[in-house]
Amino acid sequence: MPFTKHEVATNFVWKLAERCGSQAISFVVSIILARLLDPKDYGIIALSMVFIILLQVFADSGLATALIQKKSPDRLDYSTVFYANIILSILLYGAMFVMAPFIASFYGMPDLVLLIRLLSLVLIGNGMANVQQAYVSKHMIFKRFFYSTLSATVLSAVVGISMAYHGYGIWSLVAQQLVNRFTSCVVLWLTVPFRPLLAFSWNRLKELFSFGSKLLASALLDTGMQQVWQLIIGKVYSPSDLAFFNQGQKFPQVIVSNINASIDSILLPTMASVQDNRERIHDMTRRAIKTSIFVMAPSMMILAFSADTVVRLVLTDKWLPCVPFLCIFCIDYMFWPVHTANLNAINALGRSDIFLKLEIIKKILGICILCITVKYGVLAMALGTLFTGIASQVINSWPNKELLHYSYLDQLRDFMPTVILATMAGAISFIVGFLPISLFPKMIMQGITGGFCYIILCFLFKIDSLWFLLKTGSRLLHK
């Protein structure tokens, strides 16, 4: 049954509130921990998570997305996926427990063994929560995510900061990860009405896996490629270089993941509910791209043009080497909604085969860029990810020229005016950065001036996403 506009808008607000709340807390926590800990500690955690993140893709196996895409999954479908995920997660944890000494030897860091074995417990936590998360998404009850994520974020923040303050160093980061994952899992179990049956169906598993297997392969390619960059930086260069690379990603991710994850969570179940109506999916895809870029572009451009001020104030001068990475990733992440909208449209139409083909093409391109840039340094590698991201926009949109009659050129016409105006607003905030004032008022002035100029420019150039958001907000307030 298709969701109403009010249901979609309300759940988007809940999802955005969940993401913004958790990310705001996480951002503040990361600032405090970055001041208390050494950049090397962050680099070591990033190295440890490379293999865990890759195995986490297996723990899902694409089955959760298959549940969301399926028109009418029943309790037997959910129960089958639940038990499959639990068994697979335990097996994967066992694999990481055994592999830990070999990974530590690869990096030449014996202390990684215990650290990896503890961090790998998140695999079991994720396996226990995957089906609850799919149930929430399928039934559009995102208020449950709000409760679970905020509870986990607050509790893990208290634990992490307390341990770091008392001198536990890198173990404070380990504890933060584990407390976050298992608290979220417990709260989901308490608030989500789904409970598994004592039943399992191989036929249902095969049916769901026929769709999910292609998403699994796609996710492995995507996640594997991301982690390869981390692995190579940590191996060829140093944990500190990796920390600066990751910290440059973290700032734009705080903003982008809030908006993009909210869109991603809402868009697939909404599109799947009208998967037989391609005109509706075309309209949804176009509106998602225009509206999300309208919000994302100014955030990224103002942050990029104010990067030096932000890093000096928030992280202190010891993190200044991450400034160029921050600017590069702001440009890259600004276009994430284009990827998200196009790929969700393809999945909603049940074309996971096309999804897989796109991932193969993008990863071949990514490997080529990685091989070219690795010998020129970490900054060259970051620029390589930017080039790959821009090329991936074209690749992801290509099938929708035929499926939805919505080509990449059409998409460019929809979002480029917004990007140009956002860049102009960012340039104005950069000029404000030359004022001879202290860092905190300078950062505030750069943000406010850039944002105000952006709104004025959008009003003057009659950007329709501005009026769409105002009307949508007005309707929600009245209801």
Image (cartoon, grey):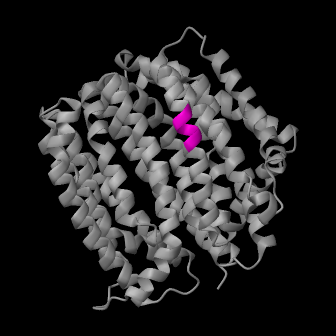
Residue 295: x and y, percent?
66, 45
Q: Give the residue at x 81% y 62%.
A: 402
Magenta range: 364-368
Counting the numbered discs, the total is 0
**Please, is residue 199 above or below residue 100 in the view?**
below
Q: Residue furthest top?
A: 436
Q: Is residue 42 or residue 342 the one in the foreground?
A: 342
Residue 434 is left or right of residue 470, and the answer is left
Q: Position of 141 compared to 267: left or right?
A: left
Quarter holding residue 56:
bottom left
Residue 84: x and y, percent? 32, 76
Residue drawn at point x = 46 percent, y = 58 percent: 18
327 w.r.t. 57: above or below: above
Where is residue 398 shown, x and y percent of the image?
74, 53
Q: Is residue 89 left or right of residue 362?
A: left
* Point 17% across, 35% down: residue: 105
- State the quadrant of the C terminus: bottom right
Using the image as rendered, state which of residue 132 and residue 458 is in the foreground.
Answer: 132
Predominant SS along the magenta part = helix
